[in-house]
Image: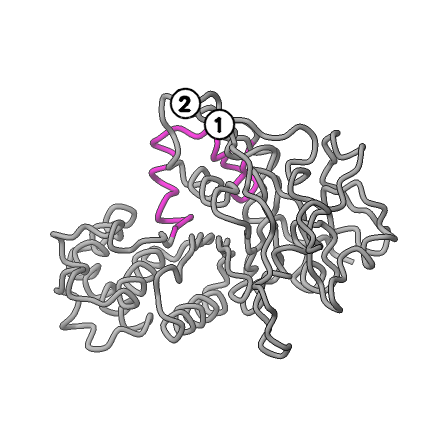
Amino acid sequence: MSAPDPPLLAVRDLEVSFRTEEGVVRAVDGVSFDLRAGEILAVVGESGSGKSVTAMTLMGLTRSPNAVFGGEARFRGETELVGATDDELQRIRGAQIAMIFQDPMASLNPVMKIGAQIVEQIRAHEDVTKEQARERAIELLDRVGISEPRRRVDAYPFEFSGGMRQRVMIALALSCDPSVLIADEPTTALDVTIQQQILQRVGKLRDETGAGVILVTHDLGVVAELADRVAVMYAGRIVERGTLDEVFYDPRHPYTWGLLGSITRLDLARPERLPAIAGLPPSLADRPEGCHFRPRCPHEFDQCHRTPALEARSADAPGHRDRCWLPIGERPALRTVEGQIGLAPRPSEAPA
């Protein structure tokens, strides 16, 4: 039996901290994962969990005098991204690893025609003429579903709707056929019909190009539709990691239970109150000792004051890992709330 191909991207113990007036903010704390060709890895969690910082660090976009980095991220087993020089990153960024940013209006140059922005990126990485790059830009706009691409290649970003601008961002990201595509909340602020079109486009482009995709999102509906594997982040750490089916149908961390339980179900009777995870995420400058989710978890016990490792808890699912001290045999009963997966309220917050 042949060995599997090495991952496109191998991240090991990635750490990102920022020195601030309030203290050291540990935005990413020991994050590890692999990304393979043709795979969509979803990174999910609440705002402030470290998802976007992880993604932007891989692109070299979090470097500043106040930033401190640790760990490594190897691209194709050779280039180490965390310690790469700015010149090395410049050659990789956009050409081999590309990113669809969360807000296309803030990411596109508002006074530069969209075609010129795509042409600029192509020519920065490839030895082609301006005319050749322009023809490719037109092809890319057509590929992502923009009508009349030969005319609209000379339009400015403000002449497009939010959904069309996001398509332009996808075309820009794909302009040099990258091996890794990072999509950071690609459907933010779009209506549901446009969201569906963008997600279908990302999935189709993955199938056409064989690129590995990191999908950063807090929308579990998006994850269910696109992802092959899922990494759940909380307070800078991955607290659960596994295949889509493992995380959705056999979730093992209480935080994941809370996320899944917070999804509104149309096939069930309407609850009196919308389900939610009690409390707020901790400050990354003053995180709780041990399990960071401990103050919000109804199943907290003494051992939770120690930091659990991200590891497999059962031999039948060696790739399904989590950070939780609860006995694996007790978890199915604990995660069942009113007949479905959810997080029970803490004793002090339970209704009388």
Q: Quick check: 105 above or below 29?
A: below
Identify the mark nearer the N-term, 1 or 2. Answer: 2
Which quadrant would residue 39 be assigned to in this image? Answer: bottom right
Residue 90 part of the magenta-drawn span = yes
Magenta residues (range): 72-99
Q: Which residue is disc 2 drawn over?
A: 20
**In the image shown, does 164 or 77 lie closer to the viewer?**
164
Extreme-front residue of the structure: 352
CA–CA distance between discs 1 and 2?
7 Å
Q: Which residue is disc 1 drawn over?
A: 25
Q: What coloring was used for the rendering?
A: one colour
Q: Quick check: 251 above or below 207?
A: above
Residue type, numbered disc 1: Val
- Identify the residue at horizontal 68%, vertical 55% (top origin): 351
Residue 116 part of the magenta-drawn span = no
Q: Are marks 1 and 2 in contact (CB under 8 Å)?
A: yes
Residue type, numbered disc 2: Thr
User: Helix or strand or loop: what does disc 1 sit on?
Assistant: strand
Which quadrant would residue 57 be assigned to in this image? Answer: top left
- Identify the residue at horizontal 54%, vertical 37% (top origin): 73
User: Helix or strand or loop: what does disc 2 sit on?
Assistant: strand
Instruction: Identify the image quadrant of the N terminus.
Output: bottom right
**In the image shown, does 50 or 197 lie closer to the viewer?**
50
- Identify the residue at horizontal 31%, vertical 62% (top origin): 166
Q: Position of residue 10 (x, y in %)?
A: 58, 42
Q: Position of residue 227 (x, y in %)?
A: 57, 63
Q: Position of residue 240 (x, y in %)?
A: 67, 48
- Identify the residue at horizontal 55%, vertical 56% (top origin): 42
Q: Position of residue 90 (x, y in %)?
A: 33, 38
Q: Quick check: 130 above or below 55?
A: below
- Marking on residue 189: none
**In the image shown, does 159 or 268 lie closer to the viewer?**
268
